[in-house]
Image (cartoon, rainbow, N blue to C red):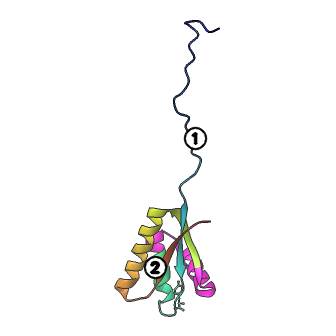
Amino acid sequence: MPTKDDTIFEPKTVTKPRLERPKLYKVILVNDDYTPREFVVMVLKSVFRMGEETGYRVMLTAHRMGTAVVVVCARDIAETKAKEAVDLAKEAGYPLMFMTEPEE
Ligand code: TYC
C-alpha cells in the first residue's frame, strides 16, 4: 500500500518524438533551344555560386539530357534561387527555365 510519501508523478502528456526532417527540394535546370550556353553558365555561376567547370558540366548535362539537378536545399532557398535565375534570363530576353520539386 503506498503511503503519503510514495506519491508517483506521471507526465500529463506523452510527447511523440518528432523525427521527420523538413523535406528537401531540387532546383532543376531545363534545356531549351534558344538560351546561349555561355549565358546558362553565367547564371549558374552568379546565382548558384558554381565555378566555371561545374557550371559548364551542369549546363552540358541539361543540354544533352533535357534537365540537370543544380542543387538540393530547403524549399524557400530553392524557390528563391530558381526565381532569381529565371528573372535574370527574362531580363536578358531568354526562355531559360528552372523548376523546383521535392526530393523523393
Ligand atoms: N541548348 C542551348 C543551346 O544549344 C543551351 C542550353 C543548355 C540552354 C542548357 C538551356 O538548360 C539549358 N544554345
**Position of residue 6 in the picture relative to residue 48 (left or right):** right
Q: Quadrant of the N terminus?
A: top right
What is the quadrant of residue 43 in the picture?
A: bottom left
| SS at circle 1 | loop
Indicate the position of residue 96 as horizontal and vertical percent values. 46, 84
What is the quadrant of residue 4 in the picture?
A: top right
Q: Nearer the viewer, residue 10 or 46?
A: 10
Q: Going 46% across and 79% down the picture, which residue do you hit?
A: 42
Indicate the position of residue 32 as horizontal and vertical percent values. 52, 89
| SS at circle 2 | helix
Task: Give the amino acid at mark 1.
Answer: Lys
Find disc 1 in the rendering and name its residue.
16
- Give the number of the disc on residue 28: none
Q: Report how far apart the C-alphas of labels 2 and 1 lie in the structure.
A: 47 Å
Q: Is residue 103 above or below residue 4?
A: below
Q: Is residue 51 above or below residue 10?
A: below
Indicate the position of residue 50 as horizontal and vertical percent values. 51, 70
Task: Give the amino acid at mark 2.
Answer: Met
Q: Which residue reaches farthest right?
A: 1
Magenta segment, principal secondary structure? helix
The crowding category of the residue bearing disc 1, from other C-alpha atoms within 10 Å (few below 14, some 14 to 19, many at least 20), is few
Q: Which residue reaches farthest left?
A: 91
Find disc 2 in the rendering and name its residue.
42
Q: Which residues are magenta?
A: 45-67
For the image, the number of numbered tags is 2
